[in-house]
Image (spheres, rainbow, N blue to C red):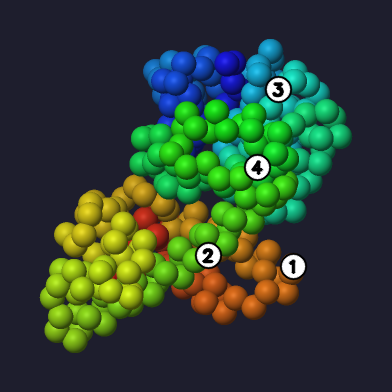
Amino acid sequence: MRIAFIGLGNMGGGMAANLVKAGHIVRAFDLAEPALARARENGCETFATVREAVQGVEAVVSMLPNGGIVKSVYSGDVLGHAPKAALLLDCSTIDVASAREVGAAALAQGYAMVDAPVSGGIAAANGGTLTFMVGGTDAAFAAAQPILDAIGKTVIHAGESGAGQAAKICNNMLLGASMVATSEAFKLAERLGLDLQTFYDISSKASGQCWSMTSYCPVPGVGPTTPADNGYQGGFATALMLKDLKLAMAAAGDVGAPVPMGHLAEELYKAFDAAGNGGLDFSAIIGTL
């Protein structure tokens, strides 16, 4: 399949490379030349503009920073320039309203489109083990699944247009809050004189068990290898966690949902980011407790 891939950053670069490995012809675009160079090394064809990249493709996959950019790219360079038969898959994490707006605009011009944000981070993007939460019609989801299967391990249909984004921001609100709580528990255990490995061995098998504990422990040398074992480098950046928490809080405000833990997590990550830690993995927040 001929696939245009728009946005080759930390996540998109690995995803595009895995599409090549799966046997697809990938026509790639990014504003940054180093990202394009890496894409060429990974077997992608690269282009100077989005409009060139989408010519003659059967699908367009995008991985972009925010809703404004997604709307601009699709309205200005994808819709009306990619073939009408091309399936559109936006894997960016953006606000639900923007996802629905772009999906409606695509539908109005005769395109099938899904919003398919991801969970898993850079390692999963490079390893092809991402989880996709997909919003769109049953037919669009069925068409998108083979493409997403090539770059992920789990592909779930969340519902109609925008449902993928709703699932993603709810999931990451839970992740942000649970990482703060997990970090607090470890710091309290330490101050109470518990050996942290012993506490992990207990809590990871007791009612306090959660993903932030057992799969992404914020304590170096405890549990499986995580960014904590690499100076909190790599993984899921604090700035990205803060972005997702802001999206979740905005969505909660739109529908009048009380999310006190989500609000607290946002405030804590906002302060952590403002202190110059935006590039560190989000689990590094344990250092503030």
Of marks 1 and 4, which one's residue comes earlier in the chain? Answer: 4
Q: Which residue is located at x 37 percent, y 56 percent? A: 281
What residue do we see at 44% from left, 21% from top? 22
What kind of element bears circle 3? loop
Residue located beneath label 4 in the image: 115
The crowd level at tag 1 (other Cα within 10 Å; few <14, some 14-19, many 20+) is few
Label 2 sits on residue? 173
Residue 36 at x, y percent in the picture: 49, 23
- Residue 9, compared with residue 256, is above or below; it is above
* Disc 3 + disc 4, Cβ < 8 Å: no
If the image is split into quadrants, where does the N terminus sit?
Answer: top right
Q: Which structural element holds mark 4?
A: strand
Judged left or right of residue 244, residue 186 is left
Mark 2 or mark 1: whose residue is earlier in sequence? 2
Identify whether 49 is placed above or below 177.
above
Q: Residue at x 53, y 15 (%)?
A: 25
Kind of residue indicated by mark 3? Ala
> Tag 3 or tag 1, which sits nearer the N-term?
3
Left or right of residue 267, residue 251 in this image: right
Q: Relative to residue 91, is residue 33 drawn left or right?
A: left
- The disc at residue 254 is 1
Q: What distance separates the C-alpha of mark 2 from that of mark 1? A: 16 Å
Which percent across, then down, holds residue 40? 44, 17
- Residue receiving disc 3: 86
Q: Amino acid at mark 2?
A: Met
Return the mark for residue 165: none
